[in-house]
Amino acid sequence: MKDMYGVQALPIKGVDEFTWEVEEHGKKRNNASLKDLESLSKLTTLEISLGELELIPRSLRLCSKLTRYAIYVGAHAYSVEHDWHKFMHLTLPTITTFPDWVSERIKESEVLWLKSDGSKSVVDELNLNGFLHLKELRIQNCGKLEYLTNAVDGRLQPSVFIFPILNTLDLRELANLIGVCGDQLPGAGSFSELKELQLGCLPSLTQLWKCPTQNVCLGNLRLVFLHECGSLGSLLSLSIASGMAQLEELHISNCGKLVEVFSDESGDGNVTSKIKFPKLKTIYLANLQSLIRFCGRIDGIEFPRLNDLKVYNLPIIKEFYPNSYNDNTLELKLLFDQKLLFGSFKRLELYQLQNVSEIWCSQIQTSSFSKLEKLEVESCNDLRHLIYPSMARALVHLRYLRIRNCQVMEEVVVKEEKKAKDERRKNEILFPQLRALVLGDLPKLRSFFQVKHGLDLPSLDFLSVFCCDELEAFSLGSLSTPKLKAVSSDYGDVWVHDLNTTIKLIYEKQKSQVPPDFRLHPTEEELLCYYLRKKVAHEMIYFNVIREVDLNKLEPWDIQERCKIGGTPQNAWYFFCHKYRKYPAGSRTNSVTTAGFWNATGRDKVIYSCNRRIGLRKTLVFYEGWAPNGQKSDWIIHEYRLDDSTHETKGSNLKRISTLEDPWVVCRIFKKRNFHKTLQSPQRTSSSPDSKTQPYNSIDNDGVLN
């Protein structure tokens, strides 16, 4: 390196790409030594991998002009893409005594990534007195780590701030982490510049700070990501939350013991004054089995800039927050009340809220939802209605409304008693911008609008209704839908005169009972050439008993119940579903449910009819547990899709079907040990082009095409 005297920037990446030679007295060297760096007196930028800590010289004088560096220490250190200024990446078996020059680089670092299984307290064991220059800290796979700092040990001076300019804190896969600090933080400025807090796979985390009301200011925090912290009862206290004026995103998922996001740390039952999150744009809450409420008892809460609220699988949530005017609010099971204020709300998604009987109270400030554009409600099985007319009138920007699998819902828009006298007034315009409406798997739904006066939906041009067995009329009064030309249903696209007449026709078809001895034994040819072709072409499927299913929403045993036909025992069940993506064979997950995942196996099998390719069959196997290490089950799916080369079919408006254009597949699901080969007749369908099959003409009483 003596020939590189004038070098200012030196990138040497990869432990495997470059081997530093240990300098030994009196021994000739063949490779460069770290000591050679001392000769680079003009060096300002250095990127270097050092390998094993034991091979690093104890003393090394780097150039005083060095202002930018990325140093990787450890046998498995690797270079990463990073906008670094002073960056350290440590992959070590344990925190040990570093050479002085390494300690100095760590102490001056702006970015530190650490993997070290032997540390219990990073700040104390590194003895860096607060990480005064650190802006980003990422710690992963430190199995013994309990705290970032445990100030009770007395190693830190009481006046020292912890991470005073830290912007990003990312803690992941730390099996024994209990909290950030084991005692009261030593300085009031600790974490005061924190902007991103990401916590994932921390099963022992019980609290972030031992004294949550003291010396913690998160006024600059913008993003919170919390995932799989199974012992955490709450994220932060209300007193800290009230100062989080810069918060923009909040994501919390798979935290089984989380009772509330922001807790009342006082425990005296007194009501906290209103809190406001002036910049919060996104809230995502998912798979929180113990969550009862969003926050403790307050007098009101405001989200003036919230755009997205997505809530998934909160089985016991009963309210957004308890309030002062009713001590029995929990029994109301009301998600949003009149003291909850939104300003620019655009998207609301509510899934699997089993304990909520009303979303809005009738007195809620409708202006809070006036900018809502998308509303999805699914698997909320305590909801008997969705919305009041006063709220519906306020949703002037709503474009998309989807309601699915709400087992007791009887109407979407329910009349308000005090306004019953106005029922005979002229047509009322509700949802003036609504373009798409989806109603599915609502077995108790009787009508969309249970009021006798007229209803106008001037922008509605797409309506899907399926598995709504009691839906006899869309509304009780006159109805105007000038842009709607058809209703997508279990029987294809249907339209007769007007919307109410069309819904009546669909209702009558659904009431045509399946004979008790009915059995569905379609061949592969029939599944492809009749059922799937008509489904893709939006044509009427006469006597259609094949339902639509979302593989991501139902377990195999739930599909069995959903797709049951008649009263006779079945060995196989049939359904349509969307083909979301192409399935490669191997370990890649295809469709994930709560209990497991479907995985493709083997090659696609070509299906022939009269020596002509008509489609492909893929086999999927269900594994219970998390991918890719689940337990293989007996549940099998044969997924059928039309062949890419299919051309114009006589008597069908389907002229050409391609894989990219075809959103549907038809599936047969069965348990391997119960499935009998006799379900398919080898004389009528085959995977061989030599097989001779007869064209279909009609459906017999057993639902088999002749």
Image (cartoon, rainbow, N blue to C red):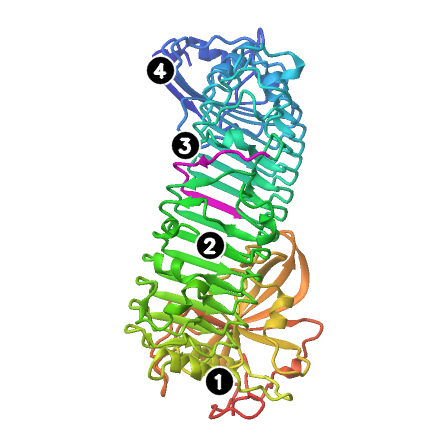
Distance from the alpha carbon under mark 1 to that under mark 4: 83 Å
Query: Of the residues under marks 3 and 4, which one precedes in the sequence?
Result: 4
Residue on which disc 1 sits: 509
Could you tell me residue 189's position as x and y percent?
Answer: 49, 18
Crowd tier of the residue under label 3, counting other residues whose Cα lies within 10 Å: few below 14, some 14–19, many 20 or above: some
Question: Which segment is the magenta one?
Answer: 270-285
The amino acid beneath tag 2 is: Glu
Residue 706, compared with residue 223, is above or below; it is: below
Q: Secondary structure at mark 4?
A: loop
Q: Nearer the viewer, residue 537 or 687?
A: 537
User: What residue is pinned by disc 2?
Assistant: 349
Counting residues from the start of the chain, the first of labels 4 and 2 encountered is 4
Q: Quadrant of residue 236?
A: top right
Q: Quadrant of the N terminus?
A: top left
- Going from the N terminus, do you reach mark 2 or mark 1 first? 2
Tell which residue pokes out farthest to the right in this image: 673
The type of residue carrying mark 1 is Lys
Q: Tell me the amino acid under the disc marked 3.
A: Gln
Residue under label 4: 7
Q: Can residue 685 be seen in this snapshot?
A: yes
Instruction: State the SS at label 1.
Output: helix
Q: Residues within 10 Å of mark 4 (few under 14, many from 20)?
A: some
Task: Please give the label number shown on residue 700.
Answer: none
